Structures are given as structure tokens and as C-alpha cells.
Image (cartoon, grey):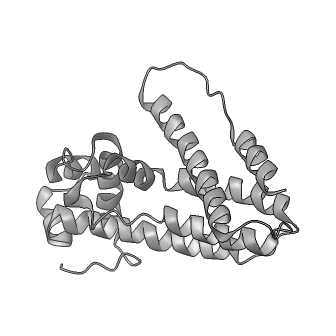
Amino acid sequence: MANVNEEAVTNTQQRIIDAALDLVSHVGYKSTTTKMIAQKAEVNETTIFKNFQSKQVLMDTAFKQHTVQITKEVDEFFSQSFENTTDLMNQSGRFIATIFDKHRQIVIGTIKEVGNEQTKTIFTYKQEYIQQQLCNKLKECSNDHSLTDQQYETIAFIFNSAIMSLLVDKARKEYSDDEQSMTIHLDDVIELILKTVS
């Protein structure tokens, strides 16, 4: 199967996709083998190749599927109206944290593979898209017209990155025996950013 419609996959294909993403988020792209994926998805290894032709096609399908879902959720969220900047940042912070957590396998997998030339075409994660949508909405809601476009972009970048670092920290704690407590929380990030735009 050369082209898999990432929006209309079979149950078996979805199990394979979910298994692949889970493994990539834990051990990385290179270390994830089709044999490991087959075991985790409880299918024959040949089933993977019948459905996806190769590991690369499988991962491309998996990431495209999540990209479509993320884009749809982001567009829906940012199409709504917000009372003011405070409302926008409070709701956006919670939305971004939720979307990163919901799609954590793709987020963690993308972070693990930064700089891997082999996966550069596969990992089309939409963090930049979320940032751009937030930046546009922030400009629309802000009463502070002294900020430049670059300053709005910087605020959106820092906000998005800080929330992602919370997810990475949470994932690190889940996968390790590290008992350190998190010293910063989502509400702290929101409050800090609100000070820059209010």
C-alpha cells in the first residue's frame, strides 16, 4: 500500500501506528524496528509491510495523521473569540498543554529526533503552526499597540516553548526514577507571560 489515507485507517493500521509512535517516543526512530512495532501492535511483521511498505512510510503516515488532527484542533480553538488578552492566554495555555499532552508521543518523538537527517522529512510537527496562530490572536486581542510583530512572535515562542518544557519534564519523570518535584507550573508560565503583554 503506497499511499495510506491517514484519516481513514483500519483498526489494524491504527494499532501499528500507535505502537510505532509509542516506541519512537521511548527509544527513538533508529532504535525502533519493525519487529518491535509488530510485537507491540500484536501483528505479524509482514502485516506492517503489507499496509505501509516500509518503516519510513509507516512513520510518515503516523506523523501526517497527528499533524492533520493537531491542525484541525488548533484552527477550531483559535477561531473562537476571547474577552481580552488575559482570557486568551489563560485559555491558550491550557489548550496548548492539553494538545501537547494529547499528542505527547509525537511531541516527544519529534524532540528526540531533532537533527536526525533521516527523519527530517517525516517529523512535520506543528509547534510552529500553534505559535503562529497564538501570535495572530495575541495581536488581535492586545490593547498594547506599542509591541512589534517580532515581539509578539517572541512572546508566542517563549510561551509555547515553556509549556512544551513542562510536558518534557513530566514525561522525563514518568520514564525515570527521578523524584524531583516540578518547581514551575502552567499557571506560573501563564502569569509570567501575562506580565509582558498586559
35 sits left or right of 7 in the view: left
Q: Is residue 83 left or right of residue 168?
A: right
Q: In which image quadrant can residue 185 be found?
A: top right
Spot occupied by residue 140 in the image (x, y as percentages of width and height): 77, 75
Q: Between 90 and 38, which is closer to the camera in this rendering?
A: 90
Farthest-out residue, left = 46
Q: Above or below — where is 2 with respect to 179?
A: below
Q: Residue at x 53, y 18 (%)?
A: 179
* Residue toward you, 35 or 24: 24
- For image coordinates 34% across by 65% down, the residue present is 62
User: Seen in the image, is 169 located left or right of residue 82?
Assistant: left
Residue 113 at what x, y percent from top left? 30, 50
The quadrant of the rendering that contains the N terminus is bottom left
Quadrant of residue 102 in the image?
A: bottom right
Residue occupying image coordinates x 33% and y 62%: 123
Residue 21 at x, y percent in the picture: 34, 54
Task: Count all numbered tags in the image, as a single digit.
Answer: 0
Q: Which one is nearer the viewer's eye here, 18 or 165?
A: 165
Residue 8: x and y, percent? 39, 78
Q: Nearer the viewer, residue 80 or 53?
A: 80
Kindly identify the residue that appears in the image at 35 percent across and 48 percent down: 22
